[in-house]
Amino acid sequence: MPKTWLITGCSSGFGSLLAEAAASRGDRVVATARDVSKLAPLVAAHPESIVPAVLDVTRPETARAALALANERFGGIDILVNNAGYGFIGALEEGAPEEYRPLFETNVFGLIETTRAALPTLRARGGVIVNFSSTAGISGSAGSGYYNATKFAVEGLSEALAQELAPFGIRVMLVEPGPFRTDFLGRSITVASHEMPEYAETAGRRRRYRETNDGRQAGDPAKAIAVLMQALDAESPPLRLPLGARAFQAADAKLASLGADVEAWRSVGIATDFDPA
C-alpha cells in the first residue's frame, strides 16, 4: 500500500531528494518549504503524488495547516520527516544571542512543534517519525558547539519519544549523516559574525573547513537516501542510522571514549549510593 509522507525542508538537499524518492516509488508526499515556489520542479515531476505546502517550522500554525492539508487530501500521514534545519559555526564565546537563539528555534523547537502537530494523526494509525540529526549529534567538535547542542537535543528527545510512542505502533528513527555533498556548507549554514583570534586553532579550523570543503564532501546524497529508504522498509529498523564513513568513525570514537571513562571511574562512581541498611 502506498504511504503518505510529510517532509519538512524540501526546497533542496536531503528533503528534496527524499520527496523525489518517495514519489517515484508510488507514495504520496506533502512536500513543504517556507517558499513553495522552490518546490515547483518536484510538483511538475510528480503532479499526482506531490502536494506542496507552506511550512515554516518556527511558526507552529503552518505545521498545523500542512497536517490539515494532508488529512484533507490523503486521510492523514504515515511518515513524518523532520528535515528542516541549518548549521552554525563559531566558538561559544564568539556566538551572539541573536545568532544562536534562532538556531534552537528552528532545529529544536520547530521540530518539537511539527511533531506535536502530527502526533494525533500518527497515534490513530501508527507510522514513523524520522528526525534528521547529524554526526554533530553523536559527538561535539570545536566551532560547532551551538549546532552540536541542537542536535544532541534532537537525539535525547527522539530516544524518549521512541519509548513514549512504541505502544501506539509508531517508530522513531534518527538519521545521522556525516558530510554529504548538499548545500549544507553553503546557504544552509551561518557563521558567527564575531571572530576571535584566540580561537584560531580550534573553532577557527571549522570556519576554514567550511570555506574549503563546500561542494567537495565525500558523501553521495543519492546513496544516502537509498539507504534511508532501505532502513524504513526493514523489518527491524534502527533507532539510529549513521550515514557515511565519517559518521561511523565518529560513533566508534564516541563509544570508545565513553567506555574508557565509564570503566576508569566505575568503582568509585558506583560507591556513591547509600550504604545498605
Image: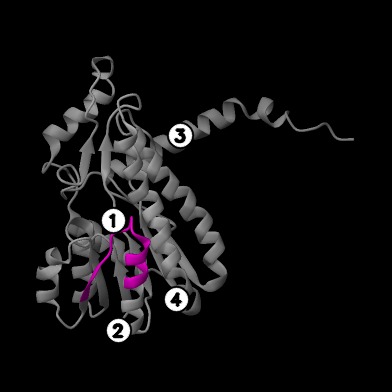
Residue underneath mark 4: 121
Residue underneath mark 3: 256
Q: Residue at x 83, y 31 (%)?
A: 275
Q: Residue at x 14, y 74 (%)?
A: 43
Image quarter hosting the C terminus: top right
Q: Earlier in the sequence, mark 2 or mark 1?
A: 2
Question: In terms of secondary structure, where does tag 2 sit?
Answer: helix
| Most foreground residue, 230 or 205 | 205
Most distant residue in the top direction = 198
Q: Judge whether residue 150 is colored magenta.
A: no
Q: Position of residue 67 (x, y in %)?
A: 35, 73
- Quadrant in which residue 249 is drawn: top left
Q: Magenta stretch?
A: 51-65
Residue underneath mark 1: 84
Specify the amino acid type for callout 4.
Answer: Thr
Q: Compared to 18, does 148 lie above or below?
A: above
CA gap between label 2 and label 1 equals 23 Å
| Most foreground residue, 236 or 23 | 23
Specify the amino acid type for callout 3.
Answer: Ala
- Quadrant in which residue 115 is drawn: bottom left
CA gap between label 2 and label 4 equals 14 Å
Residue 73's disc is: 2
